[in-house]
Image: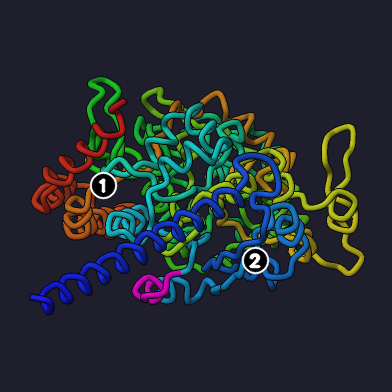
Amino acid sequence: MKLNKLVVFICTLVIVFIQACSNNDEIKEQNNQNDAESNFNETGMPIVNESIELDIFASHSPMSAEDWNDVLVLNEYEDMTNININWEQIPMSGLEEKTNIALASNDLPDVFYGIWMGHKDVFKHGSQGSFIPLNDLIDKHAPNLKKLLDEYPSIKKGLTFPDGNIYSFPTIYSPEFKSLLVGSKPWVNQEWLEKLDMENPQTTEEFYQYLKAVKNTDLNGSGEHDEIPYGESSNNLDYLDHWLRGSFGIGNKGRLHLYVDLDPDTEELRFIPVQEGYKEMLQYMNKLFSEELIEQSTFTMEEEQYLANGTEALYGSTNFFNPVEMFGKEGEAYTSGYALEGPNGDKKYTGISHPLYSVGQFMITKDNEYPAETVRWMDYLGFSDEGVKLFYMGIEGVTYEETSEGPQLMDEITDNPDGLSETQALAQYMIAPGGGHPTKIVSEYYSGADNSELELEATEKLEPYLIDNPWPAFTFTEEENKELKTIGQDIEKYVSEMKVKFISGDASFSDWDDYINTIENMNLERYMEIQEAAHERFQDD
């Protein structure tokens, strides 16, 4: 009996001891949580009172600063925030492979930054738990991004996945920065227009007549007909496609939707590459190509050759970026082109993107011990006016100066005494050159060619004909992504291949019905059901 009492007593002591230890652990955990909360500042700077560290896995463009662990702008931001970043910089050439290895490891970085991850993979790793949902964190700790999402609901819709979660900070082009949203623009050789006594084309027929005149006239004075009426750097004439779609009544939801848009008569989703307007556009492009008004080597030519031809003053027209930037002094001969009115009276410019440029640029992982602090860090640097100014302009008195016209980069940057380009000079102080950052890009602090006077004038000429409300890229469920990986890729690959064949003449338009039947037999019906489901989710409030 005494032995039993002793056993009971010992067991009671053990239980009391375990409970005490458990209570101590809970108290310790609560104390740690309280310490973390007391270290974190909801507003103002620094973000934390006592310094913390974050490990960030980041893509590295050769145009950017060489060592992100010691660069002026980030050093300044570290002093402001008390958050020290350990950057692991991954060259673009091996980025995808090393990203996959990092994600498969048991030791994730705190953040994946600027890795150009597509919608499908962001959703995959988010739904599997590698990336944490950011909805509540954005609501509580990202006032600048939240304001932007509230102001532009279509950006929020494009950033939200079918499970209702946001898993990343995006790259956003300011909706007011039309030149950047348009990107590549049409250009026509003004000097040659004057020699031909012709006006800048405003219809597809006038454009055709201009190209014919260029082909048949020795405009560059070389003594031979080496002028190229139209040329571009894309191997499948994507840029000409952007210029012409609105002339044939297709592509009314912008550059991020090459395969689906809305039928203007029924407001129903339609598959663009089987529409009559698409056929008419290809027939027009085939006419230009067959008459050698389009560069004949365009489907195989490297971009370097395109640029070389431009510097030799061979092009009568093109669609690309600032011709002075691309072709040097010879680019001064060009004026911007118009949106062209097509044979049926259509006149729109559809080659414009939605402001939500890229979703996969900043994902916080499950191993991050400081998600709130990380969100505040990114929100200020990427989406507040002060942070964006710091990120793109640098430090006043070092990289820029304030003027009556706003902040301007200093002469040492724009006219570097060591012969560095503006991008190379900026890269000595910041990581912005090279792009791919989770940030809002605004014209006030952007030094790229899209903000040049020439491109702003080109955009102003196109603006009356820009389509309204281009769509962001749709998001799909895991099952939809699996199906699109097969039927979607097959259909889109076939369409792309046949586009080149129709334009080049390798396929006859008498086979158009066979082309449509082939697409339908590749399960176009299911492809459109998936697109419609994504469209309905996008439309839902």
Task: Give left or right: position of 45 versus 437.
Answer: right
Instruction: Answer above or below: position of 185 versus 120.
Output: above
Cα–Cα span, label 1 and label 2: 42 Å
* Numbered disc 2: secondary structure: helix
* Numbered disc 1: secondary structure: loop
Q: Tell me which numbered mark, 1 or 2, is placed earlier along the sequence.
A: 2
* Residue 424 on image: x %, y %: 76, 65
Q: Quadrant of residue 136?
A: top left
Whether the residues at callouts 1 and 2 have beta carbons within 8 Å, the answer is: no
Q: Which residues are magenta?
A: 100-108
Please identify the residue farthest to the front as the structure is shown.
Answer: 2
Rendered residue at 70%/49% (across/down) = 46
- Please give the label number shown on residue 476: 1
Q: Could one spot residue 417 in this view of the protein? A: yes
Quarter in which the C terminus is drawn: top left
* Residue 60 on image: x %, y %: 58, 69
Q: Could one spot residue 58 in this view of the protein? A: no
Front-most of residues 175 and 304:
175
Front-most of residues 431 and 507:
431
* Residue 243 on image: x %, y %: 48, 40
- Please give the label number shown on residue 308: 2
Front-most of residues 302 and 96:
96
